[in-house]
Image (tube, helix red, strand yellow):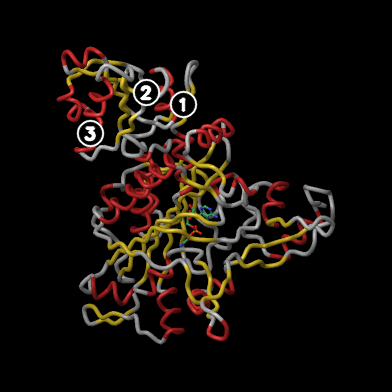
Amino acid sequence: MYQRILEICKRRGITYPSFEIYGGLSGFYDYGPVGSRIKQNIENLIRNSYVIDEGCMEVECPVLSPQDVWIASGHVENFTDKLTECVKCGEPYRADHLVEETVGEGCDHMSISELNENIKELDIKCPKCGGKLDRVYDYNLMFKTYVGPGKYKVSSYLRPETAQSTYISFKRLWDVGRKRLPLGAIQIGHSFRNEISPRKGMVRLREFNQAEVQFFVDPEVKETPRFGEVSSWEVELRDRVDREYKATLEDLLDDGVIKIQLIAYFLGKSLNLFRSMGIDPKLLRLRQHKDDERAFYSTDTWDIEYMSPSLGRIELVGVSDRTDYDLTQHMKLSGENMQVTRDGRKFTPHVIEVAYGIDRPFYCVIESCFREAEDRTFFSLPPDIAPYKVAVFPLVRKDNIPEKARDVYSLLGGERIMAFYDRSGSIGKRYARADEIGIPYCITVDYDTLEDDTVTIRYRDSKKQERILIGDIISHI
Ligand code: GAP
């Protein structure tokens, strides 16, 4: 299935590997004309869900930041993967992935010495040439560069997460947001990680897209009056001691498995968001990070994972309590005071972070919505996610039919409905093209249209067709 999806994605301008004519570079993917529309729709669903529903502000900051930012955040010291290389052919590997392939899931928290021991005891060799593997060492994932020339140049890094630039502007947001807590800020943009072995297509990229929400809160109020909207939902999970079961978010909170109500709320909200994108909810589960696995900045982290039939487990979002770690670190190094005063108390706000990737949900939407029937393949994308909402076809290229079809296309454009005009090939071929980019409705203009102003509307998922008046198209769809 994976190969068939990739083939359609390339052929239909959804996504394809970057720099193809130069042989490609692993870890980079292009979004084509169709894919970039789907991606924007996914981003907008997340954006609206936080900016409109939760009253978050949106910010956009540079992708390049001076070294001090990453020293303060701890990334220069800690943002590493465990690397080993083949002494014979030089092939680099993530040591935990190699061990995982032999012993099974759950090696990403192993220390360097544990990994060295495992590689020795299990006699793991280079999968490419069978050569011996070298000692494991810490490899920093950030891309380093310099800003400016000569002696004025400033050591800098491409950001590995959007979060830090949002933290740095906290004082500005505090003033603009009229000094209230909770204060939410979302940033959608590119992040970069020099991954050791990018794999599984769009799942592990070196340049990728994130939508990260930072909720600055009073450390004594990590709650929300909206929890009732999700509290009774039953979720599937694997907790930090590897127990797998189903429970409601409320029970998980009452039993102390999820420690913070805001985390439980954002997990429920995110499950709902993924479902509305078209991701199969039966394949989603929560996973709590183990104590020795959590990122250096977090006290409790939960992921939502998608169990892909073709690629295995894929992490889509991480929800963390980052406490006051980041703001405190930036206060120390910059000297800027980021404390606030409320009800006579002076404190540094805590941060609950909801960190969505975009590329992984994108792939999971595509995979979940992929349908194969005897006579066709199509993507059953929800209308909000579909790249175009309607396709418009003139039956023939003569007798005033294209002009009439153009009128229908303009009518849709006038209502700001993204439509796709296609006049080439047989109607059957045009349906196939529309199906393979997930367009929910196709409208055909024919000779009858000239007589009675009706068109044929065809529904993607059922293939059902009916005749409706042009004047009814907008209300109908
Ligand atoms: N600010 C916290 C943070 O960055 P993360 O779990 O490292 O947390 C958040 O990243 C999300 O970004 C992940 O859940 C995933 O969807 C996406 N992501 C991370 N690394 C990625 C990569 N190399 N390629 C594609 N997406 C990635």
Disc 2 crowd, CA 10 A, few/some/many (<14, 14-19, 20+):
some
Describe residue 40's horizontal placement relative to residue 409 as left or right: right
Choose between 277 and 347: the one closer to the eye. 277
Quadrant of the image for the N terminus?
top right
Q: CA distance from mark 2 to mark 3?
A: 25 Å
Quadrant of the image occupied by residue 362: top left
**Type of the residue with mark 2:** Asp
Of label 2 and label 3, which has the lower sequence position?
3
Q: Nearer the viewer, residue 10 or 424?
A: 424
Identity of the residue drawn at 25% across and 13% down: 447
- Does dot 2 land on a helix, a strand or a loop? loop
- Name the residue that disc number 2 marks: 461
Identify the secondary structure beneath mark 1: strand
97 sits to left or right of 410 = right
Q: Could you tell me residue 251's position as x and y percent?
A: 37, 49
Q: Position of residue 408 (x, y in %)?
A: 23, 28
Q: Identify the image quadrant of the C terminus.
A: top left
Q: 117 or 424, which lies in front?
A: 424
Mark 1 = which residue?
Answer: 371
Give the amino acid at mark 3. Ser
Residue type for callout 1: Arg
Give the mark nearest the N terminus, 1 or 2: 1
Q: Reading the chain from its start, which is encountered first: label 1 or label 3?
A: 1
Give the residue drawn at x 42%, y 45%.
Answer: 36
Does mark 3 have its CB less than 8 Å from ligand 1? Answer: no
Residue drawn at x 33%, y 20% as measured from the top left: 397
Q: Secondary structure at mark 3?
A: helix
Residue at which label 3 appears:
410
Disc 1/disc 2 C-alpha distance (Å): 9 Å
Q: Is residue 350 visible?
A: yes
